[in-house]
Amino acid sequence: MSYMEFKPLVKKVNLKPKGIVEIVLETSITDLQGKIDPLSSMIDRRAEASLDSLVVNYNVAINTKTNKPVVNYKVDDSGVVHEVKPEGEQIEAELGLPKEKILTKEEQEEAERSVIDDFIREGFAPQFDDLPYDFQSIISRKLSGETYMKIASELDMSSGKIVELVDEYRSRVAPMALKWDEWRKGKDKPKAANEKKEDKPAEQADANTENKNSDSPDDVAASKADQGETEGSTHDPEQQGQDASGVSENDADDHGAEKQEDAAAAIDKETLEAFILSGQAPVFEEIEYDFPALLARRKAGETWLKIAPTIGTSSTKLQAAWSRYKKLVTDHMAKQNGGEPGAA
C-alpha cells in the first residue's frame, strides 16, 4: 500500500540544520488500523503529504463596555440564521439617529470544521459580495474526495488561492454555524412531559370566584392593612423606594450596575486568565468543567478540540461553557473590585 489517509495531531515542527524541517505527527492505533506496516515501509523514503486543519480559527468583536460580542445571532424555525441588532442600535435605527461608536476588541475563537462544513453543505450559509463563489459546491466536492487542485483548475485559479478563499469563508460563517448547530441539536429534543399545564377544573374556578366575592369586611380591612392602606396611614407613593438621602432604590441599582459594567470592561483577557490560573476564581454550580486546570492545559499548547475528547465532551460544548465561565468570573471580579478597575 503506497497511499493512506488518517487524521493526526500535529505535535511538533522542528527546524534542524541545513534547512531541514522535522514534522512530528501523532495519531491513535485505531486510526492506523491495517496501515502501520505500510507506513513503516515509507521510513526514509520520499512521500507526498498534504495537511488540512480540522479546526477553524475565527475572530469575534467584543464590546469593551459590556464584554459581550458586538454581533449576536438567532435561528428561526426553518434553520435560517439572522443577525440580532442590539436593543440600543435597533432604537437608533427606528428613530433615524446616528450609530453610537462602540469600542471593541478582537478575541480569537476556534470551532470544529465539521460543524461549519455541515452548515455550508446544508445550504444555510450566506453569500458575500466579495466572495462570489459557490462554496457549498466546492466544500461538498472536496469532502467527497476531489482535490483542491482539480476544483481550482475549473475555476481558473491556483490551488493555494482556493484554499485561502475557503479558509476565509469558513472563518466568516463560523459564529453563525455554531448558533445553527445549537438549533439543530435542540430541535429534536422531546418536550418536557409537564410542559403543558392542565386547566383548573370548572368547579374549582367557580369556588375561587365565590370565595373572592364573599370576603367579609374584616377580611377587606386586613387586606388593606397588609398593603399599607388602613385609615390613618401616611403612605406617600412618591417616597416609596426612596432612602433618607432622597435617592431612589432604582437609581442606586442603576448606578451600581453601571459601575459594575465599567469594572468588567476594564478586565482584559490576560488579567482574567491570570486570575483563573491563580486558583482564586470561585466554583459555579452551573459549570461542570474544571476550567483552571483546562486553561493550564491550553496554555501549555493544547487546543479545545484536543482537550474536549479527553473529558468526554465536544469542543463546541466545551467552548460554549468556557464563554459562560469567563462571563461569570468577569462579573465576580467586577463585584470584587467594587467598581474600581484594577482593585482585584
Image (cartoon, rainbow, N blue to C red):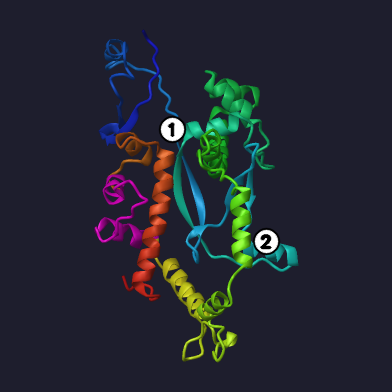
Q: Is residue 98 above or below residue 52?
A: below
Q: Is residue 187 above or below residue 233?
A: above
Mark before the other along the chain sequence, 1 or 2: 1
Asked if marks 1 and 2 touch (Cβ < 8 Å), the reply is: no
Residue with the most extreme top position = 1
Residue range (magenta): 269-298
Q: Position of residue 254 (x, y in %)?
A: 51, 75
- Any magenta on residue 314? no
Q: Position of residue 26 (x, y in %)?
A: 29, 27
State the residue at coordinates (45%, 47%): 109
Judging from the image, what secondary structure is the residue with disc 2 in?
Answer: helix
Q: Please state, as top left, top right, bottom left or bottom right, where the N terminus lies in the image.
A: top left
Residue at image mark 1:
53
Q: Please state, as top left, top right, bottom left or bottom right, where the C terminus lies in the image.
A: bottom left
Q: How dense is the environment of label 2, judged by Cα within 10 Å: few (below 14), some, or many (20 and up)?
A: few
* Quarter assignment of residue 264: bottom left
Residue at image mark 2:
90
- Any magenta on residue 281? yes
Q: How dense is the environment of label 1, judged by Cα within 10 Å: few (below 14), some, or many (20 and up)?
A: few
Q: Position of residue 197 (x, y in %)?
A: 56, 46
Given residues 96 and 190, the one toward you in this image is 190
Work out whether residue 17 can be spotted.
yes
Please give left or right for residue 29 compared with residue 63 in the image.
Answer: left
Judging from the image, what secondary structure is the residue with disc 1 in?
Answer: loop
Q: Amino acid at mark 1?
A: Ser
Please give left or right for residue 10 compared with residue 209 in the image.
Answer: left
State the residue at coordinates (46%, 53%): 107
